[in-house]
Image (cartoon, rainbow, N blue to C red):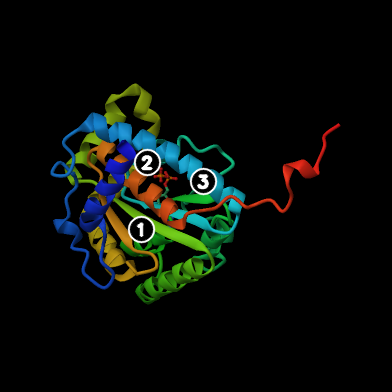
Amino acid sequence: MYARRMVKLTKQIDDSVLVTPGAKSNLRKRATNADDIFDDREAAEEATKENAKAIDALQDALWAERKRALLVILQGIDTSGKDGTVRAVFNRCGPLGVQVTPFGKPSDEELAHDFLWRIHMATPKKGVIGVFNRSQYEDVLVVKVRNLAPAAVVEQRYEQINAFEAHLNDTGTTVLKFMLNISRDEQRERLQARLDDAEKNWKFNAADLEDRKLWDDYQKAYEVALDRCSTAHAPWRVVPADRKWQRNAIIAATVRKALEDLAPQYPKPDWKPGDFKIE
Ligand code: ADP
């Protein structure tokens, strides 16, 4: 019941979350909540659970087939909910089928290579769903905002990323990209909760406050990345993420739909059960 409803919902939401390739993303005008689409929190949470279950079943077939891979990229500023999304959307998948990779500050070794080196090494092999918590986009976001590389180097990266993602797509990896879009007020509340709530203290990082001061610069950098890297083979989706349950519902439904479109098939055995007798 929920399954049908959510697939329909995905189609409806897709128009609002998708960044049409070639068009401006207009990030600043995009909603950070989806109250106009969702009025029933319970139904949305139920649907997310159903979709997480379906994602697990589809992943099983993807692994059995071992011909294609799915890469889910999660980007968003601090507190936007990247970890929470992984927990809600992939919680039914066993550890064998899903591989989550967080990308933090590059090591000396990683910096000694081209910026896509560590990214490419972490892409999922055939049969696996890979989830990136941050990604190659950090190299045109934090690196741009904090001037960690010359502007001309950053400038080249958009096309390099597009070419890399086209290569992944052409060689059997579907790329789904989600930008978790939260408001400045929502970020304040989430950071404050990390100070106020003892169980969340461990998540607090004073450096996040420094990034918060650069809010406008980050928004601008995101806008450029969305404008230049939403392609037909790997489009961006900007997900309203102020409400976790809406964010989860949108992403779970979209991931499920992508897997259903891949329609992974269990391989047919080239033997019959009657061919064997187990003593
Ligand atoms: P998170 O904030 O995602 O939970 P961390 O606290 O490890 O995890 O933060 C990762 C940090 O690494 C972020 O501040 C991010 O901007 C930074 N980072 C990621 N990729 C790069 C990069 N290519 N160059 C510089 N900094 C990066």
- What's the CA distance linking mark 1 and mark 2? 21 Å
- What's the CA distance linking mark 3 and mark 1? 33 Å
Q: Residue lying farthest top? A: 198
Occupied quadrant, residue 30: bottom left
What's the residue type where badge 1 is placed?
A: Val
Occupied quadrant, residue 140: bottom left
* Quarter of the image that includes the C terminus: top right
Name the spot of residue 184 as percent of width and height, x first: 19, 45
Q: Which of the two marks, 1 or 2, is nearer to us in this view?
A: 2
Name the spot of residue 32 as percent of width and height, x first: 19, 47
Give the mark, 1 or 2, whose residue is nearer the N terminus: 2
- What's the CA distance linking mark 3 and mark 2? 17 Å
Name the spot of residue 98 as percent of width and height, x first: 53, 45
Q: Secondary structure at mark 1?
A: helix
Question: Mark 3 = which residue?
Answer: 59
Q: Is residue 190 above or below residue 259?
A: above
Q: Is residue 134 in view?
A: no
Give the mark, 3 or 1, whose residue is nearer the N terminus: 3
Along the horizontal axis of the image, is 279 left or right of 122?
right
Q: Residue at x 55, y 55 (%)?
A: 124
Is the C-beta separation of discs 3 and 2 under 8 Å?
no
Name the spot of residue 180 as percent of width and height, x first: 29, 49
Q: Is residue 69 above or below residue 232?
A: above
Question: Mark 2 = which residue?
Answer: 85
Give the mark, 3 or 2, whose residue is nearer the N terminus: 3
Question: Mark 1 = which residue?
Answer: 142
Q: Residue at x 24, y 41 (%)?
A: 187
Q: Mark 3 packing: few (<14 Cα in 10 Å), some, or many (20+)?
A: many
